[in-house]
Amino acid sequence: MAKIVEIASDRVLDIASRIRAACVALAEPEDRKFEAMEAAQGATNDGNNTRLSVITDIAAMSHAEEWTHAEVAQACERAAKMGNSADGEQSRSARSVGVFISEMKTFASPKVRGHLPDLRATCEAVWADETELLASVEREDRDAIETPVRKWQSRFYHLIMNVSRAVKEGKLSAPMSKDDLIAYAVANDPDHNATKVAARLKTLIGQIDGFHADFEMEELKIAADYLRTISTDELMAARKALVAARAALNPPPVWTPPVLVSPAPAPSQARQVVDAPDDGEVASGVFDYEDDILGDGVARQQASHLVMAALVAA
């Protein structure tokens, strides 16, 4: 079938030209907006690269010169004040620098500085793994992909910052493996912190109360009352047990070093065996590694059945 071509009248062409002339005015501010967005992204990337370079240098200086904890704390406090103006006013960049200086107390810490290259390398490896994983699927399927480290910290510098802080506070051990980092990110899933868990439970109870108000089913009231007996601490403990159980089902691979076998001496060689005295010391370079409760449970179990029945009925 031949395509029908509609011929515009002179009047329509004139209207179209005037509409175009009026609307094209948007192009200039749109160009400026996109240029500004590109410039902002470039500045953000430059800032992140600069941050990583500075923290590496500060950690290296602290490690080489053996800065003490007290020296680092006092020096960071004085460094932050050096940029203050006489009237106390600070620009936004000055405030950002001040916050950055305070973070040096973590990176220059004796507990962190020597491990920072390893921590950074591990973070970069896991970040690259998750980046590749996301790139391997279509955009609409990415929500189904588990990337626990990116979920915990969505920006790389913040990842380095919070990993270093966890090492300083003794919550993470260094050196750190990829499995260690992933496990820590899962354990600190932002969707499962105590504040958010409490809010989710409160919302759920409110929704069931709303159903009860609309339908006045006794089972709904029982369900809401049962949920009110569950504390945030109990939910957090249950979450911790669940994470531990999952980790036990998928333990990290254990690397076993190869056994080195010394070659047998040639027959012509004479060998003298001398028994070394056993003085109990460890050789240099070797590490020595030396009824109301039941009733409450039954009641909760019964209430749990009522909850399930109420949800099915709804």
Image (cartoon, rainbow, N blue to C red):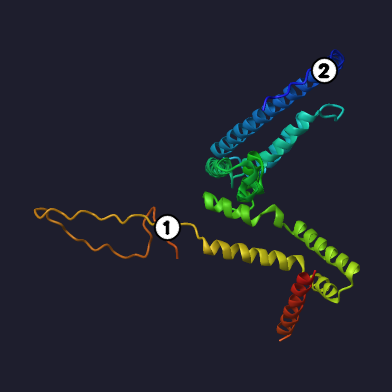
**In the rendered image, is residue 170 in sight?**
no
Which residue is label 1 attached to?
Answer: 287
157 with respect to 97 (left or right): left
Residue ID at (70%, 36%): 100
Instruction: Report the number of numbered marks.
Output: 2
- Find residue 5 and report its horizontal and vertical position in percent: 74, 21
Residue ID at (16%, 58%): 272
Q: Indicate the secondary structure of the residue bearing disc 2.
A: helix
**In the rendered image, is residue 7 in sight?**
yes
Q: Quadrant of residue 192?
A: bottom right
Mark 2 Cα within 10 Å, few/some/many (few <14, many 20+)? few
Q: Give amino acid for label 1.
A: Phe
- Which quarter of the rendering shows the C terminus? bottom right
208 vs 294, nearest the viewer: 208
Mark 1 Cα within 10 Å, few/some/many (few <14, many 20+)? few
Q: Indicate the secondary structure of the residue bearing disc 1.
A: loop
296 with respect to 241 (left or right): right
| Residue at the extreme bottom | 291
Q: Quadrant of residue 202?
A: bottom right
Pair 2/1: label in front: 2
Which residue is label 2 attached to?
Answer: 20
Compute the Cα span from label 2 to label 1: 80 Å
Q: Give amino acid for label 2.
A: Arg
